[in-house]
Image (spheres, helix red, strand yellow):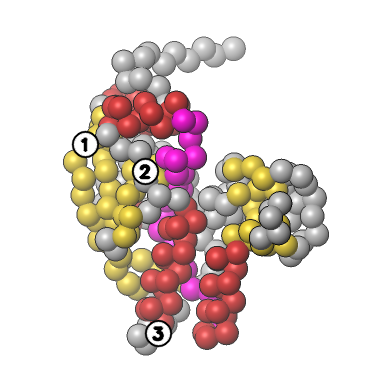
Amino acid sequence: GCVNFMGPTTYERHHYLFTGCEPSIGGMVIDFDGHVLGMANFPGTAYIPSSIVLKCLDMWKKFQCIPRLHIGMKLSPIKFLDPIHVERIFRKCNIDSGLIVKEVSHGSIAEELGVRPGDVVDSVNGECVATTVELENLIMRICENHLDQGGAIGSCMDILVGILHMRKGRKGPRHTLSLRLNVSDDVEVFISGMHPFSYYEASSKMHMDLGLETDMIICFIYV
């Protein structure tokens, strides 16, 4: 089979690579050089990168749980877009790295602080993030340090997230937001919500998603 990058289901973590074959559940995903890339999940669902598998095993041994932060955002790396889309984003916004906010969970702290679809996350706690696997590894390390310092599951902690607000099809102001998040060992429940868009905010998100020039007109045809 082959490896694909696509959006998983609502109940998954929204940012893993997928296998195109039907391997055994829990089997190894190996490249042509014999390197273990990760662990296979259910057929047609995400495989888990080996760096995350090893970190999960380590934390289970230490804490008998796998802590995580519910950030309330679905994210997609700019670098995984088609090259022509990456070039257009760079030309218009002068950015070629970061995570595009695809959705914001209704009622989340991110939504309350003004994060909207089309914005770009470029750092967490001062560390640059270019892929969602990098983000996951960083968040797991933050959680591990929190428990090492006496924190517990169910407690809250603050993280700093660098956000580029995209407005009117171009890069807007950059803010560092402080998100107070719950440390949990449960799955994140993502609640899709309706966000009031101005015409320019909606246009900015759609042009970013599609990699289009900002002066292009998007038409909808209903049949």
Q: Is residue 100 visible?
A: yes
SS label for mark 2: loop
Which is more foreground, mark 2 or mark 1? Answer: 2
Amino acid under disc 1: Gly
Numbered badge on residue 97: 2
Residue at label 3?
Answer: 148
Image position, residue 199 (x, y; %) = 30, 24
Instruction: Name the residue at 52% across, 86% down.
Output: 62
Which is more foreground, mark 2 or mark 3? Answer: 2
Q: Quadrant of residue 29?
A: bottom right
Q: CA distance from mark 2 to mark 3?
A: 31 Å
Q: CA distance from mark 2 to mark 1?
A: 16 Å
Instruction: Name the residue at 31% across, 60% down.
Output: 127
SS label for mark 3: helix
Image position, residue 79 (x, y; %) = 44, 40
The quadrant in which the C terminus is found is top right
Q: Is residue 212 above or below residue 137?
A: above
